[in-house]
Image (cartoon, helix red, strand yellow):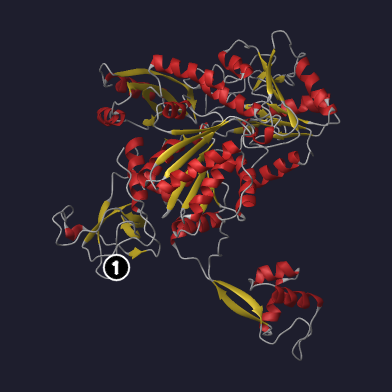
């Protein structure tokens, strides 16, 4: 990794120079930047956003290198007569030099075309046009709501509009009508009569700015020590990575809030990455209370107008704190001074489509290139981060106790081999007893099952036919609330059949296994007086819905929460004292490298929802494998012992983080074509004492979205140039038909 450069700040850009040509990178999957002629009347500089012709269309791109003048020795390349001309330069701050280096780094590391990576930094095309001015209206001079000029009758609605105009800043006509509870025609009549006069406002509203000088809550001694350490990293003004490692409920967020406050006091921008959109609502509320204003948001649920406004605010340095999903990493920050990755272990930070990257790892790269500190926060750090901290590459700050004196919950296993639930039920007698005691005590409970829908499988009792997705090698999941079967991989959906599509038998389709909807049905029957609600990605469709749900739980309007993994982290419910894990074995034997690690992290995080205030909590895990290392470690509270054993097993196998992997997924619409391409790759695979190629074999999902998939796995020791091996290897196999090869450096999922 190259040494970190100084961060390019807004206003530090050199003035444009007269130039003959410039290289422009387009947000397209092309081999590299294209040369364009620079008109004398339109000087450009590196980073400028420009409009250029490409074939018969026009594209917005970025001047990637400094413009080349006649005096430069390297002004060669495409003959000048063949160059097409830059047509327009957009009135925006240039894409900072560190951001351009980051695009190149990610492209090189992931083996992606640079333009495809650039597209993530230019994802809002509307942001390149200046915002339209807004026409608002105020009271005309000398006009009052109580008196009208001669000949104008003041009706009740007209008077309300005038009162609203007198009491507020100028508002657009539609907003003025809405706020006054009047019709648009009423406002128009007042405008025509001259009682309201227009005012032209800037197209962008000023953003409320978080206040870094605002006092935060009183921290514990451990929190204060950690916060001072993070502030010291900011004072150094250099790259550093700090792992903020604290048990659930230890107050990690308040600690890194202190670092955010310090960055704001120093006039720098801050990026906070969160893995789940459902976490955003609770986090935003805490942030607003701490800093007196909300941060800018960046995630897939934002509307197009908000995305445009946020992108421009970031580029212009007006958005001082951005909280978002992994794509927020590629926004054009001119003054970025701190990155925080919350729940850094979470698999949601891995982008599996398009440019395949891990946002946590690329955030570390972005911090390194920019010469700024980054904080990785988690109660269950990834093995990669743990090993980096143990080796001294990362600093580690530990918070070993819950904030405010709350105790960690007691964790116990319920052996399903001894305590079987009744037939077609999923809650064992010990868990039912604990639920009853919790509700009788006026407390709340959470039941965790990481399966959406009603049942994971639907089959015919007459012939055994199983309902399978026609596009994927996956069973269709029943969603009884909407009476549909759905594939959770490609989105295919079909109504619940009345008869078996194979044998035609009527009323023989049976749901097999539980999902959260089926568990909800069981709980409602067993506890009819209890207020029960489901929290899953099917029912929580955005930050607002998440906020409403979390508030309902916090206000004890819900007695039993039934949820999938989105309930596992980031939520603080003082009255929630019991967590029941319905199927603790789900995911234990996933057959991939990180199955045990992921299971431990998820169950540990779920357990951490219990007993976070004065009342002690307990966690009961239903399992048929209480002797499994994950279960033993959870029950013993031996998190560090589990990770030490997991690290040693990986070390012996030379698996990440002690070795390197790259996955090659071959796919084609025809199975024969997929097999032929995979075999050709295997024949030409690199060989050597430090290189091993496994496969080809069917991918676990051998059919996905109508494409047949085969997998090869490249395994090397650390220090081997994996990207170089792949660049030499892949061109040896020309792709025929619709065959494709997808490369995943450092794979996290093996599906």
Figure check: 323 above or below 346: below
Figure check: 347 above or below 83: above
Q: Nearer the viewer, residue 651 or 167?
A: 651
Query: Which residue is situated farthest in the top direction here?
Result: 418
Q: Nearer the viewer, residue 125 or 400?
A: 400
Q: Nearer the viewer, residue 663 or 640?
A: 640
Query: Which residue is situated farthest in the front direction here?
Result: 221
* Any part of residue 556 in sight: yes
Q: Is residue 662 left or right of residue 587?
A: left
Q: Residue at x 59, y 26 (%)?
A: 602
Q: Residue at x 77, y 41 (%)?
A: 555
Q: Is residue 716 left or right of residue 210?
A: left
Locate residue 6, reporting x and y percent.
Answer: 33, 50
Q: Residue at x 17, y 59 (%)?
A: 80
Count how many numbered circles sit on residues in the image.
1
Q: Residue at x 78, y 15 (%)?
A: 429
Figure check: 514 above or below 325: above
| Residue linked to disc 1 | 42
Locate residue 153, reporting x and y percent.
Answer: 79, 85
Locate residue 710, reporting x and y percent.
Answer: 41, 23
Locate residue 200, reporting x and y percent.
Answer: 56, 75
Q: Is residue 648 left or right of residue 219?
A: left
* Any part of residue 111 in sight: no
Q: Is residue 309 left or right of residue 565?
A: left
Q: Dividing the picture into quarters, in which one does residue 745 lie?
A: top left
Label 1, residues with CA under 10 Å away: few <14, some 14-19, many ≥20: some
Q: Nearer the viewer, residue 498 or 466?
A: 466
Q: Dividing the picture into quarters, in which one does residue 366 lie?
A: top left
Image quadrant in which the N terminus is located: top left
Helix, strand or loop for disc 1: loop
């Amino acid at each position: 990794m190259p040494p970190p450069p100084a961060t390019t700040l807004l206003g530090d850009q050199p003035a444009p120079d007269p130039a003959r040509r410039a290289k422009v990178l387009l947000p397209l999957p092309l081999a590299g930047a294209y040369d364009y002629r620079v008109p004398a009347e339109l000087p450009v500089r590196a980073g400028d956003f420009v409009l250029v012709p490409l074939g018969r269309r026009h594209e917005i791109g970025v001047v990637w290198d400094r413009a080349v003048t006649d005096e430069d020795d390297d002004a060669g390349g495409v003959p000048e007569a063949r160059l097409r001309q830059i047509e327009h330069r957009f009135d925006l701050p240039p894409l900072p030099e560190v951001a351009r280096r980051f695009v190149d780094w990610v492209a090189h590391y992931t083996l992606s075309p640079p333009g495809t990576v650039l597209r993530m930094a230019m994802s809002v095309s509307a942001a390149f046009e200046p915002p339209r001015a807004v026409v608002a209206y105020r009271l005309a001079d000398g006009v009052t709501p109580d008196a009208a000029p001669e000949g104008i009758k003041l009706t009740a609605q007209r008077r309300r509009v005038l009162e609203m105009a007198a009491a507020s800043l100028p508002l657009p006509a539609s907003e003025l009508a809405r706020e006054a509870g009047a019709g648009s025609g009423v406002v128009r009549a007042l405008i025509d009569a001259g009682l309201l006069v227009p005012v032209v406002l800037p197209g962008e509203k000023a953003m409320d700015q978080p206040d870094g000088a605002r006092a935060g809550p009183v921290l514990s001694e451990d929190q204060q020590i950690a916060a001072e350490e993070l502030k010291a990293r900011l004072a150094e003004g250099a790259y550093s990575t700090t792992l903020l490692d604290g048990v659930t409920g230890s107050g990690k967020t308040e600690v890194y809030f202190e670092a955010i406050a310090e960055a704001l006091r120093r006039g720098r921008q801050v990026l906070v990455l969160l893995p789940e959109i459902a976490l955003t609502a609770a986090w935003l509320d805490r942030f607003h209370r701490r800093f007196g204003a909300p941060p800018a948001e960046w995630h897939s649920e934002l509307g197009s107008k908000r995305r445009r406004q946020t992108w421009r605010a970031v580029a212009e340095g007006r958005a001082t704190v951005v909280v978002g999903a992994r794509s927020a990493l590629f926004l054009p920050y001119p003054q970025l001074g701190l990155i925080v990755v919350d729940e850094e272990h979470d698999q949601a930070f891995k982008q599996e489509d398009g440019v395949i990257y891990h946002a946590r790892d690329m955030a570390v790269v972005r911090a390194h290139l920019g010469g700024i500190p980054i904080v990785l926060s988690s109660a269950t750090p990834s093995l990669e981060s743990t090993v980096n901290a143990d080796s001294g590459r990362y600093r580690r700050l530990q918070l070993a106790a819950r904030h405010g004196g709350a105790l960690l919950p007691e964790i116990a296993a319920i052996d399903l081999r001894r305590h079987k639930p009744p037939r077609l039920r999923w809650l064992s007698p010990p868990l039912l007893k604990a639920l009853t005691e919790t509700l009788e005590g006026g407390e709340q409970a959470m039941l965790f099952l990481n399966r959406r829908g009603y049942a994971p499988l639907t089959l015919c009792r007459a012939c055994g036919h199983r309902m399978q997705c026609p596009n994927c090698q996956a069973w269709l999941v029943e969603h009884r609330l909407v009476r549909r079967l759905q594939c959770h991989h490609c989105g295919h959906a079909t109504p619940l059949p009345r008869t078996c599509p194979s044998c035609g038998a009527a009323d023989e389709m049976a749901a097999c296994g539980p999902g959260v909807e089926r568990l909800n049905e069981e709980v409602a029957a067993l506890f009819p007086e209890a207020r029960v609600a489901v929290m899953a990605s099917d029912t929580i469709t955005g930050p607002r819905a998440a906020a409403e749900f979390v508030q309902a739980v916090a206000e004890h309007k819900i007695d039993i929460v039934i949820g999938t993994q989105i309930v596992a982290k980031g939520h603080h419910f003082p009255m929630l004292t019991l967590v029941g894990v319905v199927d603790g074995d789900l995911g234990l034997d996933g057959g991939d490298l990180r199955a045990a690690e992921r299971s431990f992290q998820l169950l540990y995080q779920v357990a951490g929802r219990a007993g976070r205030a004065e009342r002690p909590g307990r966690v009961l895990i239903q399992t048929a494998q209480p002797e499994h290392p994950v279960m033993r470690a959870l029950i013993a509270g031996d998190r560090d012992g589990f990770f030490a054993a997991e690290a040693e097993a990986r070390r012996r196998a030379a698996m990440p983080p002690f070795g390197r992997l790259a996955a090659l997924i071959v796919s084609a619409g025809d199975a024969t074509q997929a097999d032929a391409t995979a075999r050709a790759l295997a024949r030409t695979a690199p060989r050597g004492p430090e290189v091993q190629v496994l496969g080809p074999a069917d991918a676990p999902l051998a059919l996905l979205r109508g494409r047949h998939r085969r997998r090869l796995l490249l395994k090397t020791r650390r220090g081997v140039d994996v990207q170089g091996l792949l660049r030499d290897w892949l061109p040896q196999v020309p792709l025929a038909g619709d065959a494709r090869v997808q490369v995943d450096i450092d794979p996290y999922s093996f599906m």
